[in-house]
């Protein structure tokens, strides 16, 4: 500050207030006491050099492993507090200490069932942003089905709903493969998307686009030709009732 005269502005109390406002609350209270003691002795605001000395002293105290006020015993913190006082409270300390074998709890990826987080899964990162959103959407809890419905089958013609697209612009697709869960219900299918770019013979010009989508994103338009799941009560009557 002796060589650069413009830095003398840091001795001003307003400039010091701007710097002190960035400090933690407990250090700010101590600095206020030191400012008061300085004013009682010197009848003016302490210079910037005193503020620097104060920060050096407090940083040395905070970094000292013996006298640091942050190095408290965890048992003293938890003393007198029930463990189930709040179910959503995060556990403090090393989680591996609570396990009998001392091993940390492993996280399993919900996509590939490997021991890593979803955000570090290579299979998840390889998907485009649309497929990522669809996968995360399929994990959300939805209303339970109240009645049985027909499983979607290969050959069904469907519309694929898209959140930001009007319904009259939804893309049409044909189900190529249906994935059945352990309970016998189909919740995900493989789709072959329609393509308006055809030659004169009605054949595709470009390679077909194949996607996997959950069935809650699909609207059934036309059932496959071999479907025999129509109920008798849905047919038109062929005679007058008795």
Image (tube, rainbow, N blue to C red):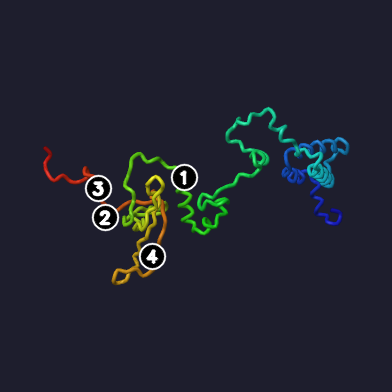
Which quadrant holds the C terminus?
top left
Q: Nearer the viewer, mark 3 or mark 4?
A: 3
CA gap between label 3 and label 4 equals 31 Å
On screen, residue 87 versus residue 241, left or right, reads right
Q: Disc 1 and disc 3: Cα gap in Å?
A: 31 Å
For disc 2, the marked residue is 226
Give the percent coordinates (x, y) of residue 215.
Answer: 38, 50
Residue at the spot of label 1:
140
Q: Residue at x 73, y 41 (%)?
A: 24
Task: Find numbered disc 3 in the image and state the secondary structure of the residue it sits on.
Answer: loop
Which numbered circle lies on residue 230? 3
The residue singled out by tag 4 in the image is 208
Lower position in the chain sequence, tag 3 or tag 4: 4
Q: Image quarter for residue 142?
A: top left
Q: Earlier in the sequence, mark 4 or mark 1?
A: 1
Q: Mark 1 vs mark 3: which is more N-terminal?
A: 1
Q: Residue furthest front?
A: 101
Q: Is residue 230 above or below residue 122?
A: above
């Amino acid at each position: 500050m002796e060589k650069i005269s413009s830095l003398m502005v840091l001795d001003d109390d307003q400039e010091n207030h701007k710097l002190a406002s960035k400090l933690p609350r407990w250090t700010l209270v101590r600095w206020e006491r030191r400012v008061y003691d300085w004013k009682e002795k010197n009848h003016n605001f302490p210079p910037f050099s005193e503020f620097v000395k104060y920060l050096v002293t407090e940083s040395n105290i905070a970094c000292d492993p013996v006298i640091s006020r942050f190095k408290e015993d965890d048992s003293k913190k938890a003393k007198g507090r029930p463990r189930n006082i709040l179910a959503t409270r995060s556990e403090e300390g090393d989680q591996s200490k609570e396990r009998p074998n001392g091993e940390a709890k492993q996280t399993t990826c919900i996509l590939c069932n490997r021991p890593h987080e979803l955000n570090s899964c290579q299979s998840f990162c390889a998907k485009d942003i649309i497929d990522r959103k669809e996968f995360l959407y399929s994990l959300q809890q939805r209303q339970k089905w109240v009645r049985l419905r027909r499983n979607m089958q290969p050959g069904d013609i469907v519309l694929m709903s898209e959140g930001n697209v009007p319904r009259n612009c939804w893309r049409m697709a044909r189900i190529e493969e249906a994935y059945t869960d352990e309970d016998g219900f189909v919740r995900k299918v493989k789709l072959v998307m329609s393509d308006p770019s055809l030659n004169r013979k009605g054949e595709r010009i470009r390679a077909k686009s194949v996607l996997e989508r959950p069935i809650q994103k699909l609207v059934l338009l036309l059932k496959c030709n071999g479907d025999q799941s129509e109920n008798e009560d849905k047919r038109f009557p062929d005679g007058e009732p008795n």
